Amino acid sequence: MVDALAGINLRRTPQGRRADARQVANNAGGYGFTVTPAARLHRFLTLGVDSGTYYTSASELAADNAQVVLDAAGADATELVRTVVEVSTSGRAPRQNPAVFALAAASALGDVDGRRAAFAALPQVCRTGTHLFLFGRYREQFAGWGRGARRAVAGWYLDSSLERLEYQLVKYRQREGWTHRDLLRLAHPVTGEPARRALFDLVCGRDAELAELPLYRAFLAANATSDVASWVRLIGTAGLSWEMLPDAALTEPDVWAALLDRGLPQTALLRQLPRLTRLGLLAPMSSRAAAVAAQLTDPQRLAAARVHPVNVLVAARTYAAGASGRSDRTWVPSAPIVDALDAAFYAAYGAVRPAGKRTLLALDVSGSMMSPAGGLPVSCREASAALALVTAATEPAHAIVGFTSAGSYRDAGLTPLAISPRQRLDDAVDAVSNLPFGGTDCALPMVWAREQGVEVDTFVVLTDNETWAGRVHPHQALAEYRAATGIPARLVVAALTPTKFTIADPADAGMLDVSGFDAAVPGLIADFSRGEV
């Protein structure tokens, strides 16, 4: 006779059923825990919502996360601003949009102190003209332009040095449906500096004296000529950036050679590598290619420019492909540059102190991980592999496995992955992009390690947390592993999409939720593995 009570097991529960009263149904039909509002906010700020997920459309994900921001603005706008500033200034997000959105929300929806904090933080978060235009667009989605908002925008134009302001106004002339003329007319900044007042007049279309505005004068001269030698001279004497030049100038190799000699900013250099290659400026064994390669891999330059590692990954993938996904332009990748981008990815993470622990890295390579990472042209699957390689390069005792299909789509399996940091980054990422995937069972790393007798101090699961296929929940599998081996194993769950779900039990001090792909993540994993977090 079948015992109907035999299926009631509080220590081993299928992921399609609730194992704990705190669990909720996730978007894939399984059950997981929910993260705190603060963790949700951090996921939003570091990951963004531009692309949606496999189970949730971009609009649904945006609405869900926007509500988290709106709730935070209403509950404690001052704390929201503090978090926004920390994430933005430390370069923890590949795109600035989420931070500017949250700042605009705080400026419109917060209490008096919160609004003041938001306005005071405007120069820290909106560091370029593009960011300021973005703030203007988001601000109008929440409220009109009150006195505080106008005063804050006016301060952006008044409080920076004249040289820096001139550069911003000439380089970033219009974005997001806004121009500096629009914002200046809205904010009405009042200055007693003749040169600053002249700059405002010029931007607003009025005649003014150019004597103390050398960059603006050079910008006008560059756009009034078609002479290559003049463009080169103006770049060298006035320091014009490529955005300040007319379109015709950007097709000239001599112009780009002058820009390189003057020094392209790190982010601009990453974006312009295909163009520089097409123009013949990065030929292998050339001194210019060697100089560019050295700049790409300079840790100080990467840190100073707040270059996000995922942006380096995007540049590396795009450049190595030799073709643009946005046009029919092609180029033959220069080997020194490909190598430099590979090294730059690791350099962008900086030096990570090894934990010295036995680490099992488990990569979710399922279909749900094919959604873009942070709205960028690289998938969460690819970004997770790249992030795993950084930890693998840090910890000598490691293994890497991937969640794959064990047969049919509904049969979850686990496959050891023969990838290592000694491989080229693009080759390692490609290795996880062609695997058979099925239902993701994030309990399998612990189950597999117990069954195979593998001793693990720290399990690191890189996932979107949309797990549903297993016969036991991940937190239960970790408890079984600890009991069977006597090892106080830890579990780090790296969230790669901004949902509210997690497989980690928030009540277990041996489990940690992190989010994003930024430079802080490998160090945080190592610190937790050592027991310092």
Image (tube, rainbow, N blue to C red):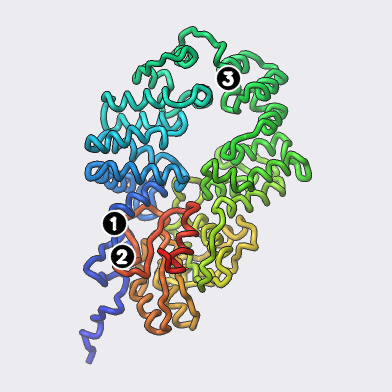
Residue flagged by tag 3: what amino acid is it? Leu
Quickly name the residue at label 3.
215
Name the N-terminal-most of marks 1 and 2: 1
Q: Amino acid at mark 1?
A: Thr
Separation of disc 3 and disc 2 at Cα? 55 Å
> Do residues under tags 1 and 2 come within 8 Å of each other at their CB atoms?
yes
Who is closer to the viewer here, 403 or 241? 241
Q: Residue at x 49, y 83 (%)?
A: 453
The first of marks 3 and 2 along the sequence is 3
Q: Is residue 27 left or right of residue 433?
A: left
Left or right: 365 as drawn, with respect to 502: right
Q: Position of residue 74 (x, y in %)?
A: 22, 42
Residue 433 seen: no
Q: Amino acid at mark 2?
A: Pro
Asked which quadrant contains residue 493, the reply is bottom left
Q: Quadrant of residue 39?
A: bottom left
- Residues at circles 1 and 3 in contact by the CB criterion of under 8 Å: no
Residue underneath mark 1: 36
